[in-house]
Image (cartoon, helix red, strand yellow):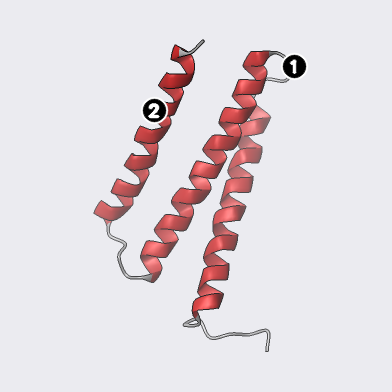
Amino acid sequence: MAAREPDDPAALTAVIVATAACAAAVASLVLLRLAPVGRSARARWSRLRALRRGVEIGAIVGLIALLRVIDGLTPLTALFVVLSFAVAEYVLSSGATASR
């Protein structure tokens, strides 16, 4: 009962969600280790930015895995997914520095 067919939509969904969550957690941990330690506003913003970027990496992994499952993954679609998140990160980062 624990082994399921790989064509089962619930099993595929669980694998994709678990993989994306794991990628987000690992990326967040790595980026948080690189963030400055302290109680200053700059350190807090740096930690929040690390968490946001970790979630973005998890979303990228999840979207690319979803595209692979539905046979929609090509180099062009993968590039589109990655570049759209890169542009969003650029906009969010430039907005944060402009408000300081």
Circle 1 residues within 10 Å: few <14, some 14–19, many ≥20: few
Give the CA separation, mark 1 to mark 2.
25 Å
Residue reaching furthest to the bottom: 1
Residue drawn at (50%, 45%) of the image: 57
Please tell me the numbered disc located at residue 90. Answer: 2
Q: What element carries label 2?
A: helix
Q: Mark 1 points at which residue?
A: 39
Task: Report the amino acid beneath label 1.
Answer: Arg
Expressed as whole percent of the image width and height from the top left, the position of residue 94 reads: 41, 20
Mark closer to the chain start, 1 or 2 = 1
Q: In this view, does 2 lie above or below 91?
A: below
Please tell me the numbered disc located at residue 64. Answer: none
Expressed as whole percent of the image width and height from the top left, the position of residue 15 reads: 56, 68
Expressed as whole percent of the image width and height from the top left, the position of residue 10 reads: 54, 76
Task: Report the amino acid beneath label 2.
Answer: Tyr
Label count reads: 2
Residue drawn at (58%, 85%) of the image: 4
Q: In which quarter of the image is residue 82?
A: top left
Closest to the observer, 85 or 30: 85
Residue drawn at (30%, 65%) of the image: 72
Tags 1 and 2 touching, CB below 8 Å: no
Question: On the rendered structure, is 67 left or right of 35?
Answer: left
Question: On the rendered structure, is 28 left or right of 77?
Answer: right
Residue drawn at (52%, 36%) of the image: 53
Q: Is residue 100 above or below residue 4?
A: above
Residue reaching furthest to the top: 100
